[in-house]
Image (cartoon, helix red, strand yellow):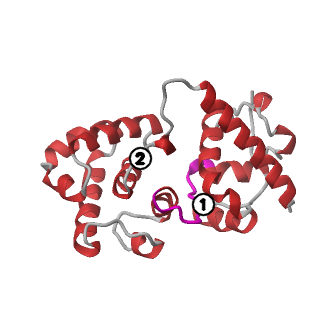
Amino acid sequence: MISTNEIKKVLEILKDYQTGVRKTTLNRESKDSKRYSPYQTLISCLLSLRAKDEVTEIISENLFKIAKTPQEILKIPEKKLKEVIFKSGHYNRKAEAIRSVSREIIEKFNSQVPDTREELESIKYIGPKTANIVLAFSFNKPVIPVDTHVNRIPNRIGWIKTKTPEQSEIALMESIPREYWADFNGMFVLFGKTICLPVSPLCSQCPIKDYCKRIGVGNSR
């Protein structure tokens, strides 16, 4: 069992790493600094399925130049919507999901994105990951959104032993001090995209290599 003190030490290192990367990244607005409405955050999550973050950001911005509310989205002809989101991949299913979610928000929630997990997950096409991202970044709720990086890295360094994002969420909320929940996703997404890569992680450059058990790591650099 990893001690709380060690977890805090690692998280402080990753927080410093995140700050350093942001300071040296010029002329680029970080994802979590965008002032998206809860609805825009929700739609951006739907667009992110099997798409790179950079692509999702561009497609989301292009879409929100045309429509920012569920009513405006539904006014876009289906063919036009698919054209706008085409490069995000799986555009047929994503267009269907965006339109379906928009209708439910209008009809069931008076055009307002709900702020509880139960209500969010009652909407077709919205799962735990999307619900938690909206709750964390739009409503400042105490949750830990679990994406591929947040699922992979804590298992790799030996903090948890889980197989699914749902299991990881429960395990992390049991072991991570509550004061780190709000920043946890952002820190691990950045770390997973720059150092702790899915394949051939940059272990020689890793700021937390002394605390990592390297579980499942094959080739590294």
Q: Which residue is mark 2?
A: 35
Rendered-image quadrant of the C terminus = top right
Rendered-image quadrant of the N terminus = bottom right
Is 71 located above or below residue 87 in the figure? Answer: below
Badge 1 amino acid:
Ile
Q: Which residues are magenta?
A: 138-149
Is the residue marked by circle 2 packed among few (<14), some (14-19), or many (20+) residues within 10 Å?
few
As for residue 146 lying within the magenta part, the answer is yes
Q: From where the camera sits, is residue 114 visible?
A: yes
- Taking the image as shown, residue 172 lies to the left or right of residue 120, namely right
As for residue 187 lying within the magenta part, the answer is no
**Where on the picture, by quarter, is residue 64?**
top left
Q: Say which of 139 and 102 sits in front.
A: 139
Q: Main structural element of the magenta stretch: helix, strand or loop?
A: loop
Q: Residue 124 at x, y = what percent?
A: 33, 68
Q: Which residue is mark 1?
A: 144
Is the residue marked by circle 1 packed among few (<14), some (14-19), or many (20+) residues within 10 Å?
many
Q: Residue 23 at x, y = what percent?
A: 62, 29
**Where on the picture, by quarter, is residue 218?**
top right
**Where on the picture, by quarter, is residue 110?**
bottom left
* Dot 2: element: loop
Q: CA distance from mark 2 to mark 1?
A: 20 Å
- Residue 80, numbered label: none
Is 216 located above or below residue 182 in the figure? Answer: above
Is 121 located above or below residue 24 in the figure? Answer: below
Q: From where the camera sits, is residue 198 visible?
A: no
Q: Say which of 172 and 219 sits in front.
A: 172
In this view, the mark in front (2 or 1) = 2
Badge 2 amino acid:
Arg
